[in-house]
Image (cartoon, helix red, strand yellow):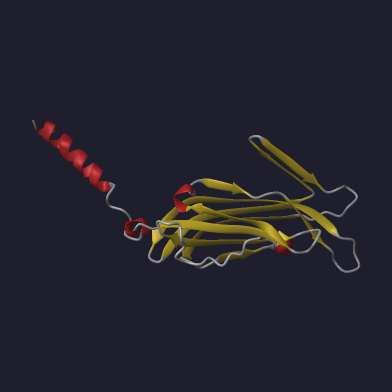
């Protein structure tokens, strides 16, 4: 008889747990959170800013990897021939948490610059190579850290050869209108 009483009680307790959200979750106020990020670099041909900017719903980011497009880089030291490289970069967010006035992300950014790179994804294969008689750039950086992002504030990581990664979190109302401004320009 005691077991029969405990089964419905357990069901009520478990269904009630889903109602106990993080008190800092904007969904309590019918808002969602969007994460805007960008990887930029100087265009090897024009010298102008190039790159990619994307926006993702925060819930889609847990264990989500974003692979940025391959790009050519160039550095021309004084009185030396220009050196070229191919940039391969990705971003990974393994976990997120709401906090007062923002979110915390476990962020991973990987940047690799070498003579040749390839990108192999389902239904998409590309590669770029610098000829062997041209001086080549070489650079690697891996960033793994927990980042606290107040809504509307941009977190920036500057790297070699003019490569920059930016990320920002903003709240969005039910109509899709941002309530916070992420100052990450469109490229």
So how many labels did they put on this image? Answer: 0
x and y, in percent, of residue 95 in the image: 46, 51
x and y, in percent, of residue 52 in the image: 64, 55
Furthest residue toward front: 175
Please tell me which residue is depicted at 60% across the width and 54% down the height of the picture.
109
Residue 7 seen in the figure:
yes
Q: In the image shown, does 112 or 169 lie closer to the viewer?
A: 169
Residue 145 seen in the figure:
no
x and y, in percent, of residue 66 in the image: 59, 48
Q: In the displayed structure, would residue 175 be above or below residue 10?
A: below
| Quadrant position of residue 36 | bottom right
x and y, in percent, of residue 127 in the image: 75, 42
Furthest residue toward left: 1
Please tell me which residue is depicted at 40% across the width and 58% down the height of the picture.
98
Where's the C terminus, which quadrant?
bottom right
Q: In the image shown, does 49 or 64 lie closer to the viewer?
A: 49
Please tell me which residue is depicted at 37% across the width and 59% down the height of the picture.
26
Q: Is residue 77 left or right of residue 114?
A: right
Q: Is residue 69 left or right of residue 151?
A: right
Where's the N terminus, which quadrant?
top left
Q: Is residue 41 left or right of residue 172?
A: right
Q: In the displayed structure, would residue 31 be above or below residue 67?
A: below
């Amino acid at each position: 008889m005691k077991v029969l009483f405990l089964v419905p009680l357990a069901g009520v307790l478990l269904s009630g747990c889903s109602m106990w959200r993080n008190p800092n979750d904007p969904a309590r106020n019918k808002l969602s959170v969007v994460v805007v990020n960008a990887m930029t670099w100087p265009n090897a041909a024009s010298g102008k800013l190039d790159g990619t900017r994307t926006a993702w719903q925060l819930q889609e980011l847990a264990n989500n990897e974003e692979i940025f497009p391959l790009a050519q880089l160039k550095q021309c030291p004084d009185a030396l021939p220009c050196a070229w490289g191919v940039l391969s970069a990705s971003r990974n967010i393994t976990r997120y948490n709401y906090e007062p006035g923002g979110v915390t992300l476990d962020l991973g950014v990987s940047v690799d610059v070498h003579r040749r790179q390839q990108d192999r994804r389902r239904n998409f294969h590309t590669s770029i190579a610098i000829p062997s008689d041209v001086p080549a750039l070489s650079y690697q950086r891996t960033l793994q850290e927990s980042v606290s992002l107040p809504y509307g504030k941009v977190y920036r990581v500057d790297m070699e050869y003019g490569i920059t990664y930016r990320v920002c979190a903003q709240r969005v109302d039910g109509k899709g209108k941002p309530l916070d401004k992420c100052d990450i320009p469109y490229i």
